[in-house]
Image: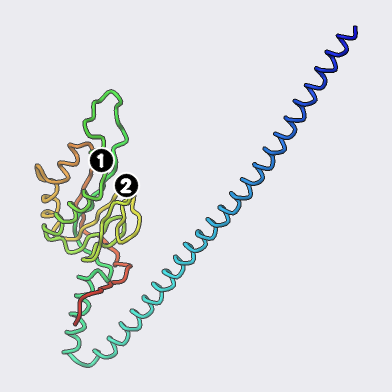
Amino acid sequence: MKNVQMRNQEVAIILGIICFILTIGICIQIKSVDSITEKKGISISDNSGLIDEVFRQRQIYKDSYKELEIAEAELEKIRSQVTEHTDVDSSLEAQIKKNNKLLGLTEVKGPGIIIKLDDNRDINIDEVIVDPSSLIVHEGDLLQIVNELFNAGADAISINGKRIVNTTAILCDGNIIRINDEMVGVPIEIKAIGYPERLYYALNRTQGYLDIMKRDGVKVSSEKKEEITIPKYEGVYQYEYIKR
């Protein structure tokens, strides 16, 4: 009987020790969780600060661009007043307006073509695809199309509403395409003003670039239009090295 009681006491002591150890472990775990939560809170706070900075910079850009538009309007008004009474100055004013169109600083209209591109997501899993990237629109495709359009005599081009000018960069940033330092995603719409028949033939002829993209599997369509509107370039020309 005494042996049984002693064994029961030993078991009770062992269970008490185990419970004590478990209690300490739980306390340590709770403190660890609190510590991690506090650190995550600091990280979230830091990220919110970065987000605020992004919005602040975006607002600064919008304000600067608005000031630029106001300055352009004032300059246009002054030009009109100066050239009101002289034929020579009127011809210079016409030349300035023409140059602004060429530089992409004014909205333009005219005949041309509209090209639409999209990634091919309708893939049959039973088909053997040698190069899956051929089903996706890349920045290199846009560069090639823009070059062919200009070579065919296009006067103005835009991609998803972004005017293409002589300083435009079309870049790949991971899975994102950037045009004029702005993100552009599929579907892609390219507008080009020029002689519609020539522009259309340059890209849709056999072995033309759109023909190649179609055969690779990219979704492609193009059509001629009597009138297309292309917006003005919304950036600012910046030159670091050229001098007058």
Q: Residue at x 27, y 41 (%)?
A: 136
Q: CA distance from mark 1 to mark 2?
A: 9 Å
- Three-letter code, disc 1: Lys
Q: Please tell me in which quadrant of the rendered image residue 229 appears.
A: bottom left
> Could you tell me which quadrant the C terminus lies in?
bottom left
Q: Earlier in the sequence, mark 1 or mark 2?
A: 2
Q: According to the image, label 1 marks what residue?
A: 219
Give yes or no for contact between labels 1 and 2 (Cβ–Cβ under 8 Å): yes
> Could you tell me which quadrant the N terminus lies in?
top right
Q: Nearer the viewer, residue 202 or 65?
A: 65
Q: Nearer the viewer, residue 198 or 40?
A: 40
Q: According to the image, label 2 marks what residue?
A: 187
How far across and how far down the image is residue 71, in percent? Answer: 36, 80
How far across and how far down the image is residue 80, in percent? Answer: 28, 86
Q: Residue at x 22, y 77 (%)?
A: 97
Q: Residue furthest bottom?
A: 85
- Three-letter code, disc 2: Pro
